[in-house]
Amino acid sequence: MDVSIKFLGAARSVTGSKYLLEIDNKKILVDCGMSQGKKELRLRNWDKLPIDPKEIDLVVITHAHIDHTGYLPRLVKDGFSGKIICTAATEDLMQIMLLDAAKLQEEEALFAFKRGYSRHSKPEPLFNTDDAKLVMQLVESHPFKTEVNLLPNVSITFRNAGHILGAAIVEMNLRGNTQQKKIIFSGDLGRYNDPIMYDPEAIRDADILLTESTYGDRLNPMEDVEGQLTQIVNEAYANNGTLVIPAFAVGRSQLLIYYFHKLMEAKKVPVLPIFLDSPMAISVTNLYEKHAGIHKIKVTKDRNELVSIFDAPNIHFCNSKESSKVLNEMKKPAIIISASGMATGGRVLHHLVHRLPNENDTVLLAGYQAEGSRGRNILEGEKFIKMFGEQVPVRCHVREVHGLSAHADQSELMQWLSNFKKATKTTFIVHGEEASATVFSKTIQEKLKWNTVIPEYLQTVELFSGI
Ligand SMILES: [Zn+2]
């Protein structure tokens, strides 16, 4: 058996994860992410893949984030028709996220057409809703900890990665004629002692390892999140104002509800109504109930007593546009959690239009804010924020909370690696900016004495020959 790997994304960057394995004459793609962020990276989505999608036999997905799945509709549009293998929760999340991504693609193409700024006379979306729906026809889900045969001599097992609902580490076993080999794909790794997700599962050995390195160069302690939130909510309450939080629909929104619920139960903050105003976040929240058991939140109804924190009487889900708009008239203290997380779009924009000019209200930024995003501009103290063609004055309080990231930091990545009983043959450092991957690579070499490689975009490496 001959095995090689080609790095089609997330090599010296954090986006567009795609690793193509060639096992004899078969081709397996692990992750199929869209490239996001800088223009140079985004343009890669429009480049022809160096391989014809029709020639790919199977796709394996680690988790549902768009930078790991967002290229699937394009792959299918361009002729891929094999199976897409993932966990059950990833399948459900992917359905929500790919349809949302398709809608965004369609809206952007339409916007470019109307404004006439595209190079093309009729700009096309990268993929549309029909392409995303086709993807879901090909998905086959499997539980964690269960061996799945992909080919007669190749199997995989999903191990819990603790990053988001359904996120997996992929353990791949190869049975050659003379030897057996194991390849581990870390996927994105979560944190230790996260209040909602379980710790990333320990892996004891591998011949080849691909490890993420998003925060390979930094420590990102889970600072006293409860202390920070207690102060912010009490301040907002004392100001008799509303607390508006732009938040990502997957993971972050649910984590915030968890913390607020806990603080209210403990009477550290007053019981305020919490409005989750994002149809996507609401759909995702419902998946925590469907997939109870792969996370720590209690969601079962015990003798008709409400146990799920998401069913608490002060938590309101705003599905309709009308219920969202009604919140603009609200004058009493309350908490509004709404997407998008960096205020680049979504319903949170109309909340910001109403709340930013009001000195009693508070805007809380609860995650990474990319340069140039409205979230970053608010955080940096801009006096006016442009929304819907108007300059909206900022007079409200602006706060920030640290420590809510869903990614392992350097110490946690090293903690996960320390479970390995012996050195891997090669460890590829992927899914990290160049600076982060370089620091992490050196750390592994110094502390574990392992052989590490930071692959280049489109590089091919032979892993095993004649095994
Ligand atoms: Zn991720």
Image: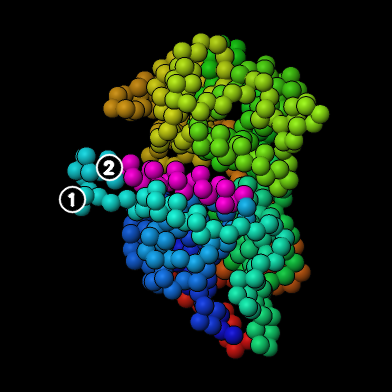
**Residue 102 painted magenta:** yes
* Callout 2 amino acid: Leu
Q: Position of residue 244 (x, y in %)?
A: 51, 24
In the rendered image, residue 421, in percent from the top left (x then y), is placed at: 76, 69
- Badge 2, how many Cα within 10 Å: few under 14, some, many 20+? some
Q: Is residue 67 visible?
A: no
Q: Position of residue 172 (x, y in %)?
A: 64, 70
For disc 1, the marked residue is: 121
Going by the numbered disc 1, the residue's amino acid type is: Ser
**Mark 1: is the Cβ under 8 angstroms from ligand 1?**
no
In the image, what residue occupies the spot 63% across and 78% down? 152
Which residue, given by chain and number where applicable, does mark 2 sit on? 110
What is the spatial separation of the Cα atoms under label 2 and label 1, in whole angstroms? 11 Å
The kind of secondary structure element at disc 1 is: loop
Query: Which color mode does the image show?
Result: rainbow
Q: Where does residue 64 sit, x and y in percent of width and height?
A: 54, 51
Q: Going by the image, does 161 lie left or right of 129?
A: right
| Quadrant containing the C terminus in the rendered view | bottom right
**Residue 331, relative to residue 376: is it above or below?**
above
